[in-house]
Image: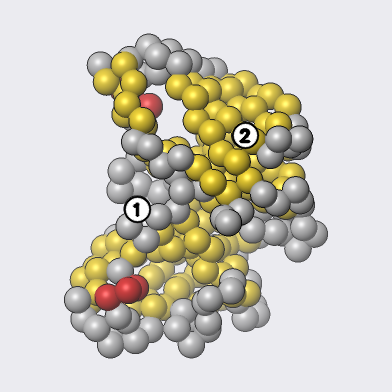
Amino acid sequence: SAVISQKPSRDICQRGTSLTIQCQVDSQVTMMFWYRQQPGQSLTLIATANQGSEATYESGFVIDKFPISRPNLTFSTLTVSNMSPEDSSIYLCSVSRTAPAYEQYFGPGTRLTVT
Amino acid sequence: QKEVEQDPGPLSVPEGAIVSLNCTYSNSAFQYFMWYRQYSRKGPELLMYTYSSGNKEDGRFTAQVDKSSKYISLFIRDSQPSDSATYLCAMEANYNQGGKLIFGQGTELSVKP
């Protein structure tokens, strides 16, 4: 398993601003992912954070809106840019040491409310 | 049609009951089948995973995969109030580049003492 922390745990932001969420893992991992969980919905993969290169985004998610960094094997950030109320959601990072990444471990999540 | 369908519940059972949670899927390429448990205001926690068809048991939990019917189940025996949570099924195809998890909507379970 892995111990994963996320900062902030929650935030309330104004429309049009940006928020950067941090994900820290207690040991090096191969793969890191960012998910969104909207109220009453399941988890949707936003992107795979690649160490040393651009993230791989899923359909419907773009780098300008959700820029991601991964400077090393234990840390990643997700920025939610130019926020609107529709971005209100829980954002989760997960990690995996397996490929395929069937065994993923999740952080506690960041609860974002956009007003 | 969603790739993974899961009855959102909520499901309420008395303590000690046997719980059956189910998911259906449409993509025959899925090879790995996972069950996650998510407590309120927490991240999902991996319970079990199964590769291809068959059964897997871990304590009070049993996972079943029927690839011919594209149907997976999680059984919880002797359910406890501490089992009250949302249970999410997830699936992954065995892509070389790592694939991605496709989650069901989650079933909210409440076990009453």
Determine the CA span between mark 2 and mark 1: 22 Å
* Position of A73 relative to A26 (above/below): below
Is label 2 on the same chain as label 1?
A: no
Position of residue B35 measured from the top left corner of the image (x, y, whole percent): 55, 38
Q: Residue furthest right?
A: B96
The residue sitting at 63% across, 46% down in the picture is B25
Identify which residue is drawn at 64% across, 27% down. Answer: B64
Place of residue B102 in the rendered image (x, y in percent of width and height, measured from the top left):
59, 54
Q: Chain of mark 1?
A: A
Chain identity of mark 2? B
Residue A40 circle label: 1
| Disc 1 element | loop
Q: Residues within 10 Å of mark 2 (few under 14, many from 20)?
A: many
Is residue A42 or residue B38 the one in the foreground? A42
Of residue A45 and residue A33, the one placed in the foreground of this image is A45
Coordinates of residue B76 in the picture (x, y in percent): 48, 21
Q: At 33% across and 78% down in the image, what residue appears?
A: A19
Q: Which mark is residue B72?
A: 2
